[in-house]
Amino acid sequence: MNKDSWGMILLVAIVAVCLYFWYVTSDFALALVLITGSFGVIWALDRLLFEHRRRERAAAEGKKPHEPMLVDYARSFFPVILAVLLFRTFLIEPFRIPSGSMMPTLLVGDLVLVNKFAYGLRLPVSDTKILNVGEPKRGDIAVFKYPLNPKEDYIKRIVGLPGDTISVHNEQLYVNGKPVPQKLIGPYSAPDQTSLKMAQAGAMEYVEDLAGVKHQILEFPPYERDPRTDGTWTVPKDCYFAMGDNRDDSADSRFWGCVPEKNLRGKAFVIWFSLADWHRIGTVLH
């Protein structure tokens, strides 16, 4: 086999190893870093060690220098993949809604865009914060690493800030002893999906005003509620209390505790596509 054939084999092997790491770790950022680094190293080594010799040899033979296929691909794809990595790490990342815990605000199949800049710039993979540009506000819809399994991403609404006392009694949310205003809309009508209609049968829809952020929530009749959803919690330093808008069908801070600041990934701000209802495309999230 010639050098281009070996180069193609090596290229495929690099991509395969990166995809394997993604499969094993479920960390897409790690796979992007590995493949970006691999292509960058190949391109840099060729520029430093081999390109000049190749040009000299071609000039001596009166031929046009031939760039190896591996180097050509690395040079072509490195800037593109690097741009994707930087954009996804520091600016915007897509996120797919996997469950109904944020209904009616978000439905299963909604695809949202997450502002990675909102809560500070973090390095990929290590998630080390390098620039603090903002903190979560009450009412934000935040994406974060699930505290009990950081390989999973969750999306909930921030209801409690560090130092707050959060209480829930008989479906009423209290922040620092003050009830959060709620206004009844009526019985909730789920989208025309059999599974959603069955799961949300009997739910009542309310408008909740959380520090000026008005949004819809769902509540079920008392006999269908988990008693663990009632209680009082104090939010520690550098932690946030998160709840789903589907109040009686959400595994959130009431069950597994607060969200550490280091687990925050960004703020969801718009539905860019929806498998549940295409009319939802472009909806700005509140």
Image (spheres, rainbow, N blue to C red):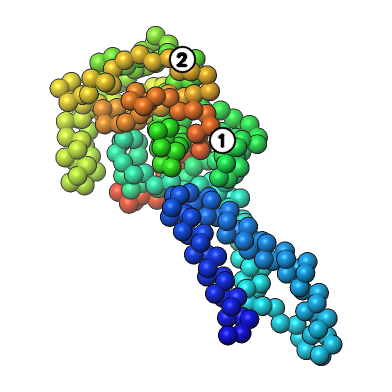
Disc 1 residue crowd, few under 14, some 14–19, many 20+, Cα 10 Å: many
Q: Nearer the viewer, residue 205 or 221?
A: 221
Density class for disc 2 (Cα within 10 Å; few <14, some 14-19, many ≥20) is some
Amino acid type, label 2: Asp
Contact (Cβ within 8 Å) of mark 1 with mark 2: no
Secondary structure state at the residue bearing disc 2? loop
Say which amino acid is labelled 1: Ala
Q: Please state the horizontal and vertical placement of residue 281, each as a whole percent of the image.
A: 39, 48
In the rendered image of this protein, does residue 98 appear above or below residue 243? Answer: below
- Tell me: 203 left or right of 29: left
Residue closest to the eye, 202 or 82: 82
Residue for badge 1: 118
Give residue 7's mark: none
Asked if residue 60 is positioned above or below residue 156 in the image, the reply reads: below
| Tag nearer the camera, 1 or 2 | 2
| Residue name at image x 41 percent, y 27 percent | 242
Q: Mark 2 points at which residue?
A: 164
Residue drawn 41% across and 30% down?
Answer: 157
Classify residue 82 by image quadrant: bottom right
